[in-house]
Image (cartoon, helix red, strand yellow):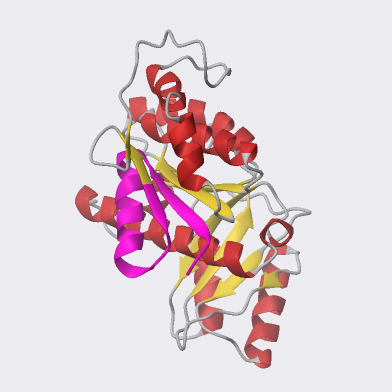
Amino acid sequence: MYSALVVGCGGAGCRVVSRICASFDFPALRINVSDADINVVPDSGNTDVGFKGDRDEAYYHAMFIHNEEIVEKIRGHSTIIGVAALGGGTGAGAIIALAQCARSLDIPFISVVYLPWKFETERRSEALKELPDVQKVSDRMFLMDNESAKELGETTINMGRALEGAELLMKHAAVKVAILAETTPFLSLMSSRCYTFSYGSESSLLGSVEQALAFPLYPTDPVGKKVVICPDAPASDLERELVVKTVADRTGLCPDFVQGDLEEGNGAFIFLPISCRSPDSS
């Protein structure tokens, strides 16, 4: 039984966690405005308790009304992993509340979050405002930009398929992060504060790694930092040596290589450090 807890925050985060629960036996918690383990009703924003940051929104205040309930539900877990789409208020509010509750119990807190597409102008603007707050409270943050996850090679994007694809990427990234948190000295392995990720699936492990390197899901900033490679299945010494050399040649960094735990497969996740500068800045 896993001891890491995955927490869906807001509508999208809850959908991702439901996908996780359908395939894996991670303990889970859902926080949303309805149909969740903890249902949040936004207050008027006049509450005197809660997050004392620059933002003063009803969802932030309302979330902290549930602090005691959140603490009791996360107590005893080794790591808390909050999953959310930013820009809607509920997800970021839950992430911040969770992080502070985890800190009160000395439990590491990891956020796995994504940004809306650029055409979602208002939500994306709000998400970019929320991002520094989420980064600040997370021991480690893993960030995907939906704008980087559009279907490749198509001139017309089917948004239903694109959203499903984004949520599947988030599902697999959150699961990989949760498994690493269970099986490795996680904060030492992921020594940078913020990462993006990418997944490759080709006929060989090297091909998958090269594909993943070519399509990171947020602008990367690897200089002087660490890249982490996670193949799906255990690799031979020769495969590992070839992959490490290729990544070192491409990035200038000697990556960490974490052996996979599946029986077979050539796919690979790569975690790449980022600076969290706005992807929309010129």
Q: Is residue 279 visible?
A: yes
Is 18 magenta? The answer is: yes
- Left or right: where 237 falls relative to 35: right
- Left or right: where 118 falls relative to 282: left
Q: Please tell me which residue is depicted at 70% across the width and 56% down the height of the picture.
A: 187
Q: Position of residue 106 (x, y in %)?
A: 66, 44
Q: Is residue 152 visible?
A: no
Q: Please tell me which residue is depicted at 34% across the width and 15% down the height of the picture.
A: 43
Work out which quarter of the rendered image holds the C terminus and state it: top right
- Left or right: where 245 falls relative to 17: right
Q: Please tell me which residue is depicted at 57% across the width and 53% down the height of the picture.
A: 79
Question: Which residues fall within the magenta stretch?
Answer: 1-29
Closest to the observer, 9 or 242: 9
Residue 132, quarter of the rendered image: top right
Closest to the observer, 139 or 107: 107
Identify the residue at the far top of this view. 46
